[in-house]
């Protein structure tokens, strides 16, 4: 079974299933940002500053617990159902690197990159991979790392790789055989459901 990690869909399985992080995390994140703005207005060293700081820490800890619980439950479900799982070998640290450069050579689209970095980190891609790896090993399974290059542009039916097959974010329409599908469901694995690296 193959898994594609994303921002819109946290996990997309080759079975056609789409899994998302708990909806409550978005509300906790909004509350945390409000609490951080309140904290920024408080005078350092004051009792109100300490109270606001505890509020931010409590919200952050709660979000972390919810995310970790979801990752454990999702990975356990997958490890019980599948013996071999294909997962893109993503360099999350590089993907979430800041877009800021220097004063002399400023970067462009810094705010958009910061938003994307935050969205990736909120999904907990690396944490999910870590938990899934050891849960598969405990059950005699295997996590296969797949080279992520061109996986979102590859057709699972004929194997053609063409960037024109994917003009927008989600749908894939193969220019060679005409297959129409959600790109996340067909990039990491072939028509036999095997990870592309296992061909």
Image: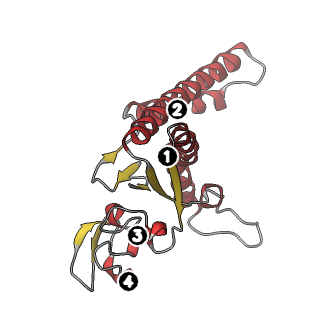
* Sooner in the amino-acid sequence: mark 4 or mark 2: 2
Circle 1 is placed at which residue position?
A: 141
Task: Find residue 15 and report its horizontal and vertical position in percent.
Answer: 29, 53
Q: Are marks 3 and 4 in contact (CB under 8 Å)?
A: no
Task: Find residue 163 and report its horizontal and vertical position in percent.
Answer: 39, 81
Residue drawn at the location 39% of the way across and 46% of the way down: 82
Circle 2 is placed at which residue position?
A: 68
Q: Is residue 52 above or below residue 31?
A: above
Residue drawn at the location 72% of the way across and 66% of the way down: 101
Q: CA distance from mark 2 to mark 3?
A: 27 Å
Circle 4 is placed at which residue position?
A: 162
Q: Quadrant of residue 51?
A: top right
Q: Secondary structure at mark 2?
A: helix
In front of the other: 55 or 20: 20
Residue drawn at the location 39% of the way across and 75% of the way down: 153
Residue drawn at the location 39% of the way across and 36% of the way down: 77
Q: Are marks 2 and 1 in contact (CB under 8 Å)?
A: no
Task: Find residue 145 and report its horizontal and vertical position in percent.
Answer: 54, 60
Circle 3 is placed at which residue position?
A: 152
* Sooner in the amino-acid sequence: mark 3 or mark 1: 1
Q: CA distance from mark 4 to mark 2?
A: 37 Å
In front of the other: 19 or 78: 78
Please give left or right for residue 126 compared with residue 46 in the image: left
Q: CA distance from mark 3 to mark 4?
A: 10 Å
Q: Are marks 3 and 1 in contact (CB under 8 Å)?
A: no
How many residues crowd around disc 4 within 10 Å: few (fewer than 14), some, or many (20 or more)?
some
* Sooner in the amino-acid sequence: mark 2 or mark 1: 2
Query: Would you say residue 189 is visible in this rendering?
Result: yes
* Sooner in the amino-acid sequence: mark 1 or mark 4: 1
Which quarter of the figure is the C terminus placed in? bottom left
């Amino acid at each position: 079974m193959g898994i594609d990690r994303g921002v819109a869909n946290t996990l997309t399985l080759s079975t056609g299933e789409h899994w998302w992080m708990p909806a409550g995390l978005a509300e906790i994140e909004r509350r945390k940002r409000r609490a951080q703005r309140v904290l920024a207005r408080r005078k350092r060293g004051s009792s109100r500053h300490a109270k606001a700081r505890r509020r931010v820490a409590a919200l952050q800890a709660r979000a972390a617990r919810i995310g970790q619980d979801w990752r454990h439950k999702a990975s356990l479900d997958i490890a019980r159902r599948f013996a071999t799982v294909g997962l893109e070998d993503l360099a999350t640290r590089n993907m979430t690197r800041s877009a800021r450069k220097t004063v002399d050579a400023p970067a462009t689209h810094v705010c958009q990159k910061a938003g994307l970095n935050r969205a990736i980190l909120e999904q907990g891609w690396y944490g999910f991979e870590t938990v899934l790896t050891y849960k598969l090993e405990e059950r005699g399974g295997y996590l296969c790392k797949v080279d992520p290059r061109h996986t979102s542009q590859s057709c699972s039916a004929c194997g053609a790789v063409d960037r024109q097959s994917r003009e927008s974010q989600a749908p894939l329409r193969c220019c060679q055989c005409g297959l129409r599908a959600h790109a996340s469901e067909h990039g990491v694995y072939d028509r036999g459901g095997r990870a592309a690296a296992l061909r």
